[in-house]
Amino acid sequence: MIGTDKMRDLKIKIILPSLGILTLIAFLLLKSPSMPSYTPDRDYLDMEIPILEAFITAQDSSVIELPEGHYLFSQSLILEGKKNITLRGKGIEKTVFSFKGQKQGAEGIRISNCKNLTIENMSIEDAAGDNLKITDSENVIMRNIRSAWTGEVSTQNGAYALYPVLCKNLLIEGCEAIGASDAGIYVGQSQNVVVRNNKAYYNVAGIESENSSQVEIYDNEVYENTGGLLIFNLPHLTVYGEDVKAYNNHIHDNNLKNFGVKGSIVSTVPRGSGVIIMATKKVALYDNIIENHKTINSSIVSYEIYVPPKNKKKKKKKKALPNGIRQVENDYENDTQYSADPGRVFVYNNQFNNKYWFPALDNNFGKLWVFKNGMKIPDIAYDGILPKDYYIEGKQINPEYKVCIKNNGAINFAALDAANDFSEFTNEIGNYECEVEFEKSI
């Protein structure tokens, strides 16, 4: 959800009592459980050359039948510039491609500039970078794919399990994503997207829609990640997203310790974050079950909350992160096409629950809830960082920044007033009990 650097920049003065019962509680709650593992049995066969040749020699309108078995590859499998191609395994448990110990390439399978592509019924494991990357392609179906890193989850795992970017007309269904050090199921800078009936667990971010438009995310189970569902717009990209619907998902128990690459945007997500809507407009979050998060069930925030404090000393230029991982950028205001603030967000008809009675104290938001929210973990929080044009014609809210929350039952709501040291922090939801009207595209 929200990074710690910006919290310091806002001069939050949260001082925990020196000793006493709160210190004892914090000690008990901060004890980190061991990281989970995914350890399937594998018996590898040598078919690298024939399968590699099948990718290289594939012609338009081909069906490449991938054989049953567990296969080990030393290099990426690449498909480029093809039309009407199907890559079909014998099943998630039956056809397994492993890139453990990969020597050439970063991705496991890399596909680019294709039209009418289906890849289905297989598992992809342990690539050095992304397990399955698809770029600049149209009419793509990713179906019944398990994408995972085996062993204990680690920062050394690849960034993205399923990584379509700059695609149009994309369907991801019946897939599983496990162990990604950035996002399990990621959709970036894409248009006309459906993400349904998937499972994502043991990732830093379970499902992430980034700078994508006309996206529907539904009937997924997202659990045991650091953060569950992320709907982001990030700066300095050629495409900016809007019109995202997320409904009928079960997003629960995303409390895993963050193992993201230091400096990445997802490395700022506190464990225990259910849903994060950040800097994206025209977002509908409804009919979901969102529960059992130690920091926050759902949040609506500005990109500004992530930005590190300004330092008068000249800083060294940041090193680019590997494999397309996005880092926090403090020069986002130089991107004149980018809006850092969320708007036209409607959160309604969701079911919120929480079995945890005390927030995580390993991030500043948990501490904030202790001192400002009666130790309660919010179901919905809005950071309240308002753009300069938030009000028009006096005190009328600019509809571009409207945030509405309705019919979510008895929830704990927090409006933070984060830009003003939380001086007007409130649990009053009345000003947000409204509706957002969407155009037909959503």
Image (tube, helix red, strand yellow):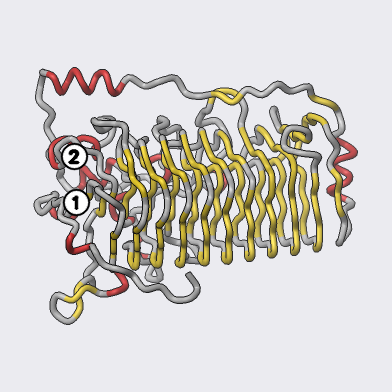
Q: Residue at x 45, y 32 (%)?
A: 259
Q: Position of residue 114 (x, y in %)?
A: 74, 61
Q: Are marks 1 and 2 in contact (CB under 8 Å)?
A: yes
**Residue on which the image places disc 1:** 416
In the rendered image, the quadrant that contains the N terminus is top left
Horizontal arrangement in the rendering, residue 246 relative to residue 19 (left or right): right
Q: What kind of residue is marked 1?
A: Leu
User: 321 left or right of 417?
Assistant: right
Total count of labels: 2
The secondary element bearing badge 2 is classed as helix
Dot 1: within a 10 Å radius of its alpha carbon, few (fewer than 14), some, or many (20 or more) residues? many
Residue 76 image-quadrant placement: top right
Residue that numbered label 2 is attached to: 368
- Specify whether 345 is left or right of 64: left
Amino acid type of the residue tagged 2 in the rendering: Leu
**Tag 1, which secondary structure?**
loop
Asked if residue 17 lies left or right of residue 368, the reply is: left
Of the pair 254 and 196, the residue shown nearer to us: 196
Question: Is residue 312 visible to us here?
Answer: no
Residue at image location 33% in from the left, 40% down from the top: 353
* Quadrant of the rendered image containing residue 257: top left
Q: Is residue 59 above or below residue 351?
A: below
Residue depicted at 47% across the width and 42% down the height: 205
Q: Foreground residue, 230 or 353?
A: 353
